[in-house]
Image: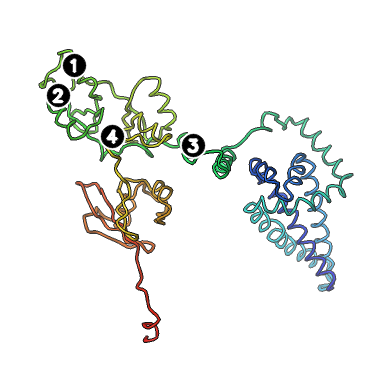
Amino acid sequence: MTLEIILIIISIILSAFFSSSEAAFLSIQKTKLFHMVNLKQKGADNVAKLLENKDKLLSTIVLGNNIANIVFATLLTSLIYKITNNPALTTILTTLFGTIILMIFGEVIPKALAVRIAEKLSLIYSKPLRILEIIFNPIVLILTLMIKIIDRKSKLNDPSNNNSITEEELLTLIDIGEEEGSLEPQEAEMIENIFRFGDSQAQEIMTPRTEIIPLSSDSTVRNFKDVYSEHSHSRFPVYEGKEDNIIGIISIKDVLMGISKKKTDDETKIKDLIRQPYFVPETKRNFEIFNEMRISGDKIAIVIDEYGGLSGVMTLRKLLEEVVGDFGEEGTHPEEELIEIDTNTFNIDGGISIQDLNEEFEEININIPDGDYETVAGFVMQKLGKMPKVGDHFEYSKLIFEVAEMKGLKLELVKVTKKSYPHITPQQESNT
């Protein structure tokens, strides 16, 4: 009985080995494997050779796994029969316990772990699997031939997919290139930005409604000049009646052109100079917006929410900055999104996105989780559960968030302080 128990344990270990082998070899990325081979890591060549013929590798793994499972089932049946001496009960118990044991220890746990450390496991498993390929070769050849015949008849094999590379693999290549110095950090960031840009939507990068400076259609060129002197944007949305009702776009170029041709004076209504607005929904992909603006020549888009109300604006410049980074303004300095007051205190722009804060300022270790908000201001408002006012504060994850500056209803600045604990000297400790 002791021998049977030992053999049962060995068969479970073998089943786990084959299951984890399958998960590891199918999970490993071609780009990472190529990198390992170039670095001449021990076992990398064996992994590459095994993956050259996946049908043969999978046949070897499946065959080995089935043998291990059959041995396990046979030994478990024998062991339980010796204990119960009842064929019917033996069948029930073997099916019940055998299935549970194999499912948990022979399939689920090994595969879950193997996916996480696919590269490491594939290097360890490569040599024993090469030996097993040789041992099982006659049977594996028959199985491989059958797979190819079925594959050919069912037309499942699509050669066009064999050399395809996934987005994840490309990003891995970029990371490798940056680590090895083949790509500058700025170049790597720009390429990664292109991938993010293709998947992002207008609502993620637009200038929100609260930051827009709209002009009434009743405004004159004189009014426009006054606004422009304080907010030197090149284009402004123009509304009629309610601010949600955008009827056009007024640009500094059109105003100057009218003045230079003496067709415009200070009393001219700006609605006589506006251009037709270009509307896009919040959920439209930024790549599509960029293409449409490039073709139409529009430099600004009005972003509309699902109810038809004004959600924000998107400029061609903003779209380009998502890929190449901030341009900056001539004669001005870009506003800092995070200012370090001291080692434990920071002033953070309320409009900075959670993703940018967590990624760009990782070194200060302010990790705000994802939620039903996109900006630091949104996170603070959710935690406070009310409209914020200067001085409102709360504690989160050993950080104190305080509303430092408001502009109307807009949260402009958040002060974040890391909680510090008093240092206890040995003398103080001995007195306690």
- Circle 1 residue: 258
Left or right of 167 on screen, residue 399: left
Q: Is residue 69 above or below residue 30?
A: below
Q: Quadrant of residue 32?
A: top right
Q: Dot 2: few (<14), some (14–19), or many (≥20) neighbours within 10 Å?
A: many
- Circle 3 residue: 187
Outermost residue, left side: 267
- Circle 4 residue: 310
Q: Is residue 317 above or below residue 87?
A: above
Residue under the point 47% across and 36% down: 190
Query: Total marks drawn?
Result: 4
Outermost residue, right side: 138
Viewer-nearest of discs 1 and 3: 3
Quarter of the image with the C terminus is bottom left
Q: CA distance from mark 1 to mark 3?
A: 42 Å
Precedes in sequence: disc 4 or disc 3: 3
Viewer-nearest of discs 1 and 4: 1
Left or right of 394 on screen, residue 283: right
Q: How far from the left and from the top, in percent, is residue 36?
A: 67, 46
Q: How far from the left and from the top, in percent, is residue 359?
A: 43, 48
Q: Quadrant of residue 207?
A: top left
Q: Dot 3: few (<14), some (14–19), or many (≥20) neighbours within 10 Å?
A: some
For badge 2, the amino acid type reads Val
- Could you say which is closer to the camera, residue 409 or residue 90? 409
- CB atoms at circles 1 and 3 under 8 Å apart? no
- Could you say which is closer to the camera, residue 109 or residue 71? 109
For badge 3, the amino acid type reads Glu
Precedes in sequence: disc 2 or disc 3: 3
